[in-house]
């Protein structure tokens, strides 16, 4: 911007200096021409002065008018087109020689002629000066016309240069606008480049984040797949355990029915035993000790064994209920992992009245429960068979 402003400031000054130099050079050229012409005129003047001196000498030697009239035609002055007179030097010398040999009687005519010649010389000198002035004026006029034409040309050139300057100014304004627009475009490009760099950095950061997130997502997918497989396995295990629990529920129900039946049978047996004891005491009183001590001891042992079996069966039923509750609690925890253990323990709180420990039931517990279930069934069968045998013995004793 500074260089363009300096160029704009220097252009009119340079134009002014160039125009002044051109005018000075033209004026010097014409002044040199005028000086050369004056020098040539001054060189021609000594010759004319020599001619006039010769004329005066010849006029002094004339003695009479007849001798002057007898001069040859070659010695007469010649008037040129320009108004100047030129004497023939050879003829003038001859006339002077003739006049020296002439009479002295014609001295008056000679004086008159001398005066006339002086007037003619004065007129000639005046004409010469006028001619020189005229020639100088003509030269000056021609020079002035040339200067006028040159000035007109220079004025036309100045106008043309003014037009060029105006066009250059408009071009400079256009160029300035273009430069400003170009600078603005460059600034926009720099801004866009900086924004592009920032966007590239953000893109790199986003790519890194996406790569990390993709890795995390892949790991999470793997974990989810593993969790799904574990959930499927746990679902299968839960289904199997649900099936086992259903079977256990059915067996528990069967055991409850069997226990009810056995309880009824025990009650019946106890009533029958009481009746048998009362009847035995009455019979012993009546018959006088008909029943032996061995049968009585057998009956007492049978009752104690039945009581022990009943306690064992009650414990087995409590254990089965406890294991069922634990299995249900474990299933509930797996289906609802967000719930606390306390909520699950409330379901089996009623089972802790018998002071039974609550442990986590695993597959080994299932096997142990299955073995205990088999033993329990065997004991129930034995107890039922034993109760049937005891019934038969009591009935036989009663019949006896």
Image: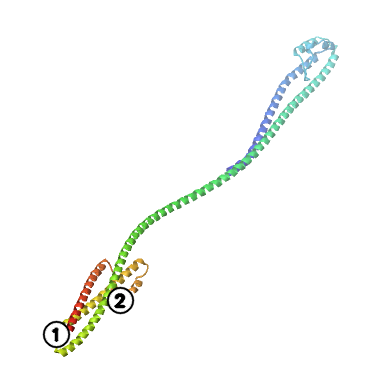
Closer to the camera in the image, 32 or 216? 216
Q: Is residue 181 above or below residue 394?
A: above
Q: Splitting the image into 4 quarters, where does residue 356 fall?
A: bottom left
- Residue hosting label 1: 293
Task: Give the numbered dot on residue 191.
Answer: none
Give me the residue at 75% from left, 27% from top: 137
- Residue hosting label 2: 352
Q: Position of residue 63 (x, y in %)?
A: 83, 12
Q: Position of residue 368 (x, y in %)?
A: 24, 69
Q: Are marks 1 and 2 in contact (CB under 8 Å)?
A: no
Q: Splitting the image into 4 quarters, where does residue 128 fall?
A: top right
Q: Position of residue 97 (x, y in %)?
A: 78, 10
- Under tag 2, what secondary structure? helix
Question: Badge 1, how many Cα within 10 Å: few under 14, some, many 20+?
Answer: few
Q: Is residue 177 above or below residue 353?
A: above
Give me the residue at 69% from left, 26% from top: 33
Classify residue 27 as left or right of residue 109. Answer: left
Q: Position of residue 209 (x, y in %)?
A: 41, 55
Classify residue 74 as left or right of residue 289. Answer: right
Q: Is residue 138 above or below residue 327?
A: above
Closer to the camera in the image, 270 or 219? 270
| Mark 1–mark 2 distance (CA, rounded to whole Å) | 44 Å
Give me the residue at 23% from left, 82% from top: 270
Closer to the camera in the image, 363 or 98? 363
Report the residue that reaches farthest toward the front.
399
Question: Badge 2, how many Cα within 10 Å: few under 14, some, many 20+?
Answer: few
**Which badge, 1 or 2, comes first in the chain's sequence?**
1
Looking at the figure, which quarter contains the N terminus? top right
Q: Is residue 318 visible in the rendered structure shown here?
A: no
């Amino acid at each position: 911007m500074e260089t363009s402003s300096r160029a704009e400031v220097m252009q009119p000054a340079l134009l002014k200096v160039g125009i002044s130099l051109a005018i000075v050079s033209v004026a010097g050229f014409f002044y040199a021409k005028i000086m050369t012409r004056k020098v040539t005129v001054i060189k021609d003047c000594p010759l004319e002065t020599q001619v006039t001196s010769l004329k005066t000498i010849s006029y002094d030697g004339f003695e009479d008018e007849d001798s002057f009239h007898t001069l040859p035609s070659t010695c007469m002055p010649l008037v040129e087109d320009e108004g100047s007179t030129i004497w023939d030097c050879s003829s003038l010398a001859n006339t002077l020689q003739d006049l020296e040999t002439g009479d002295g009687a014609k001295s008056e005519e000679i004086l008159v002629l001398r005066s006339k010649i002086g007037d003619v010389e004065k007129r000639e000198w005046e004409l010469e000066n006028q001619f020189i002035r005229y020639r100088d004026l003509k030269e000056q006029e021609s020079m002035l016309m040339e200067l006028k034409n040159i000035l007109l040309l220079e004025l036309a050139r100045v106008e043309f240069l003014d037009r060029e300057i105006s066009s250059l100014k408009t071009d400079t304004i256009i160029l300035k606008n273009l430069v400003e627009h170009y600078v603005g475009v460059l600034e926009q490009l720099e801004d866009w480049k900086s924004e592009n760099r920032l966007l590239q950095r953000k893109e790199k950061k986003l790519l890194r984040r996406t790569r990390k997130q993709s890795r995390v997502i892949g790991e999470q997918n793997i974990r989810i797949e593993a969790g799904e497989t574990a959930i499927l396995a746990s679902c299968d295990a839960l289904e199997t355990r649900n099936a086992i629990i259903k079977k256990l529920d059915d067996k528990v129900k069967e055991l409850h029915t069997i226990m009810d039946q056995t309880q009824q049978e025990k009650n019946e047996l106890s009533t029958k035993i009481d009746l048998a004891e009362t009847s035995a005491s009455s019979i012993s009183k009546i018959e006088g000790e008909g029943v032996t001590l061995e049968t009585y001891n057998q009956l007492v042992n049978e009752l104690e064994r039945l009581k022990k079996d009943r306690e064992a069966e009650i414990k087995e039923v409590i254990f089965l209920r406890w294991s069922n509750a634990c299995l249900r609690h474990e299933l509930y925890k797996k289906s609802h992992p967000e719930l606390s253990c306390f909520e699950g323990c409330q379901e089996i709180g009623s089972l802790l009245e018998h002071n039974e420990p609550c442990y986590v039931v695993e597959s080994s517990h299932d096997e142990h429960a299955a073995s205990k279930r088999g033993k329990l069934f065997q004991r129930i069968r034995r107890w039922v068979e034993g109760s049937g045998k005891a019934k038969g013995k009591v009935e036989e004793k009663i019949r006896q």
